[in-house]
Image (cartoon, rainbow, N blue to C red):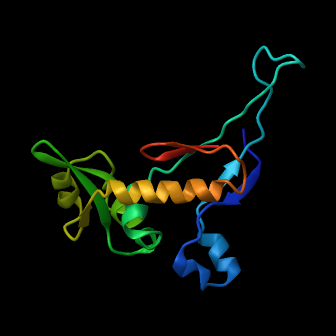
Amino acid sequence: MVATGKTLDLFEWEADREQRPRERAQRATRLTLIPPGPPPNASKDTARELWLAVHVPQLPLLAVHGAAADRSDTPWTVAVQEGNRQRVIACNAAAAVAGVQPGMSLKAAYALQAHLQTVARDEAAERRLLESLAERAHRFTPRVCIEAPDALLL
């Protein structure tokens, strides 16, 4: 089954503002909205409240490097310290092509890609970015909730 719906641009980065609108539209992170079906056991008198969850799995990478990290040919990861080991929590496309995945140890990631660039997670920057996205989401609905660490409810 193919989902159809409306597409919304949620991100517009500083560097993208200078590009032509068509190029900007091609690079923007897009979200497809699918019209919901009727809820189970719904009657005509039932008041419906629908929520949309916006999950941003690349939030740690976007918070540290912005959209430029995913367009870079340099493999990037964001890692966290867990006890005596470091774990990858996000990576860009260049790192993913080499086989790096969120959840793997940083040592395993370096074994796959020797030229890997790694930064520590910045939870404060992630929170600021999520709050900024929440402010932008108010264009679409007055009800926006932040679901830390990496999601919004609209």
Nearer the observer, 120 or 128? 128
Q: Residue at x 70, y 78 (%)?
A: 22
Q: Does 145 sit above or below residue 47?
A: below
- Residue at image position (72%, 53%) is 140
Can the viewer see residue 92?
no
Q: Residue at x 58, y 53 (%)?
A: 134
Q: Is residue 57 visible?
A: yes
Name the image quarter holding the C terminus.
Answer: top right
Viewed as shown, does residue 17 lie left or right of 148? right
Quarter the N terminus occupies? top right
Residue 153 on image: x %, y %: 59, 41
Q: How many marks?
A: 0
Q: Height in image: 122 above or below 46? A: below
Location of residue 140 with respect to 44 vertically, above or below: below
**On the picture, is 101 further left or further right than 87?**
right
Could you say which is closer to the camera, residue 113 or residue 120? 120
Q: Position of residue 129 (x, y in %)?
A: 47, 59
Residue displayed at 65% across by 40% down: 52
Between 45 and 84, the residue placed more toward the observer is: 45
Which residue of the protein is positioned furthest toward the top in this rendering?
41
Q: Is residue 151 left or right of 10 when viewed as pictured?
A: left
Q: Quadrant of residue 36?
A: top right
Q: Position of residue 27 (x, y in %)?
A: 59, 71
Q: Quadrant of residue 76?
A: bottom left
- Position of 137 with respect to 73 (left or right) is right
Where residue 3 sits in the image (x, y, percent)? 73, 43
**Among all residues in the image, which is located at the extreme left?**
84
